[in-house]
Image: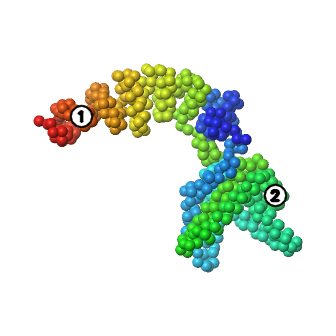
């Protein structure tokens, strides 16, 4: 039964801390790379006690393959297999004419696809859910696995012919049904052991299928559907298209369903690795942990620990943790937001207003206009003298105007002018405030007064031509 995270019940737990008696998902645990004797080792720590945690068995982490089915169909659309499928399909069309050379090229194309599919199977079996890279290592290394799989079909065919010759057609038919049912098991044994003799040994592959149990039959059902899909597409859908298009789409469908099938078999190996005796080679850089985004920047690690404390009701401890770990210098927006909300809960207004300056800068940088206006308005209501950084305050005024709050926007420009009397943006602040006063607050006389003051104070500023033009538009210039 899958173990759930103690703090995110909807997510599977990947690690456990015996000291804290807690299970953690990939988002909770802290990942740190530590240089050790010339190489980098990755260690995982408990977010509460900072001790090294134990990794749970994969069986407690992964979902059964029948739950993950939709993701199997998405797998080939990753750029890596997609490029390979397109290249193979184009090659099939280009070398479609009869002839020995074209035949050999087609055999090579399908051999490359089969080799890549085996690589995908092995990747998945070792908990690496991303498709393998297309390089010489993936395509050329250990190409013998392709010949061994072809040999499986040859050996099965010869064995069935011998059975028919010795025992007659009825026994041969029964043997053929058993052989067809056993092909996936033979391929799985071949990948698990690398031995062709083991793969065609009935004792080995039947025992392996038996250990998987009804899950093997369910897998076979899906493989049968996947195997028959290109045939159905070829006969009933793409058969009516032009010959070259038909050939291309049929080849593409075969590539697509082949890669899905091998990815599915790899996942079955992963799911039942204990039952079939397969040792999973974990690789944290491209594994199930990567898929679940284990290991985040330092700010995210702090945030995970803070969230755990909040869920336990330890608000003061959460506030202290942020202060002690950041020294008041918070560079991550989500952590800044959490700290702001904690200070608001504690009604610690002095610290909240001090932190709000940083928080508003991060909101402005993230272009979160709605939140920027909301937080600024809260702080201004608590302290009429509250002033963010000059660049942020200028953005706040603009955002308030866009949000349909012209009075607050003018007040913000006024606050900007008073707090930053030598800022280069000062003339623009005057001009924008006058624009709002005239157009939205319907007070043209006050707007003209501001604009004329602007003309006298900054006669050589680049904004002056715009000021003069706007005064003529108002129609009140003398």
Give percent across and percent down for residue 428. 26, 36
Q: Secondary structure at mark 2?
A: helix
Which label is found at residue 206? 2
* Location of residue 187 by image quarter: bottom right
Q: Does the rendering let one see residue 126?
A: no
Who's the residue at 69% across and 58% down the image? 222
Given residues 115 and 349, the one toward you in this image is: 349
**Quadrant the N terminus occupies:** top right
Q: Secondary structure at mark 1?
A: loop
* Location of residue 439 by image quarter: top left
Who's the residue at 63% across and 54% down the image? 72
Vertical arrangement, residue 473 with respect to residue 138, above or below: above
Vertical arrangement, residue 177 with respect to residue 478, above or below: below
Residue at the far front in the pictured view: 442
Q: Residues within 10 Å of mark 2 (few under 14, many from 20)?
A: some
Given residues 411 and 267, the one toward you in this image is: 411
* 464 displayed left or right of 113: left
How far is disc 1 from disc 2 in space, using C-alphas?
A: 87 Å
Q: Does the rendering let one see residue 406?
A: yes
**Quadrant the C terminus occupies:** top left
Which label is found at residue 442? 1
Mark 1 and mark 2 in contact? Answer it, CB < 8 Å.
no
* 380 displayed left or right of 87: left
Q: Residues within 10 Å of mark 1 (few under 14, many from 20)?
A: few
* Location of residue 321 by image quarter: top right
Give percent across and percent down for residue 374. 41, 31
Vertical arrangement, residue 202 with respect to residue 171, above or below: above
Nearer-N-terminus badge (1/2): 2
Give percent across and percent down for residue 141. 65, 60
Given residues 104 and 441, the one toward you in this image is: 441
Who's the residue at 81% across and 54% down the image? 210
Give percent across and percent down for residue 316. 55, 22
């Amino acid at each position: 039964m899958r173990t759930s995270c103690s703090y995110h019940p909807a997510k599977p737990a990947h690690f456990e801390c015996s000291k804290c008696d807690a299970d953690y998902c990939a988002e909770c645990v802290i990942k740190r790379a530590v240089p050790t004797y010339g190489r980098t080792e990755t260690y995982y720590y408990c977010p509460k006690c900072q001790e090294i945690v134990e990794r749970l068995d994969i069986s407690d982490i992964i979902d059964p393959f029948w739950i993950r089915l939709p993701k199997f169909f998405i797998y080939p659309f990753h750029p890596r297999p997609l490029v390979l499928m397109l290249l193979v399909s184009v090659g099939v069309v280009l070398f479609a004419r009869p002839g020995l050379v074209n035949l050999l090229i087609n055999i090579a194309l399908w051999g490359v696809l089969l080799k890549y599919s085996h690589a995908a199977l092995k990747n998945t079996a070792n908990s690496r859910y991303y498709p393998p890279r297309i390089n010489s290592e993936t395509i050329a290394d250990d190409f013998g696995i392709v010949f061994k799989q072809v040999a499986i079909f040859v050996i099965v065919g010869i064995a069935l012919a011998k059975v028919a010759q010795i025992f007659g057609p009825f026994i041969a038919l029964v043997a053929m049904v058993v052989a067809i049912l056993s092909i996936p098991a033979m391929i799985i044994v071949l990948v698990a052991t690398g031995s062709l003799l083991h793969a065609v040994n009935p004792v080995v592959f039947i025992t392996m299928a038996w250990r998987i149990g009804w899950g093997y039959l369910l897998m076979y059902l899906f493989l049968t559907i996947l195997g028959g899909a290109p045939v159905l597409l070829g006969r009933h859908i793409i058969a009516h298209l032009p010959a070259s298009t038909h050939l291309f789409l049929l080849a593409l469908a075969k590539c697509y369903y082949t890669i899905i099938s091998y990815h599915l078999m790899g996942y079955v190996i992963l799911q039942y690795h204990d039952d079939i005796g397969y040792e999973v080679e974990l690789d944290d850089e491209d594994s199930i942990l990567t898929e679940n985004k284990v290991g985040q920047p330092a700010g995210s690690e702090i945030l995970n620990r803070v969230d755990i404390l909040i869920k336990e009701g330890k608000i003061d401890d959460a506030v202290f943790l942020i202060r002690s770990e950041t020294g008041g210098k918070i560079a991550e927006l989500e952590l800044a937001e959490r700290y702001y909300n904690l200070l608001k809960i504690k009604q610690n207004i002095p610290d909240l207003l001090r932190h709000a300056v940083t928080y508003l800068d991060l909101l402005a940088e993230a272009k979160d206009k709605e939140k920027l206006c909301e937080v600024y308005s809260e702080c201004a209501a608590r302290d009429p003298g509250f002033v963010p950084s000059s660049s942020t305050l200028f953005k706040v005024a603009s955002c308030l105007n866009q949000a349909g709050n012209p009075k607050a926007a003018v007040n913000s420009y006024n606050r900007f002018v008073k707090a930053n009397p030598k800022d280069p943006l000062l003339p623009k602040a005057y001009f924008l405030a006058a624009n709002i006063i005239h157009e939205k607050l319907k007070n043209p006389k006050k707007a003209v007064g501001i604009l004329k003051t602007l003309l006298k104070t900054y006669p050589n500023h680049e904004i002056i031509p715009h000021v003069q033009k706007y005064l003529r538009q108002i129609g009140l210039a003398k």
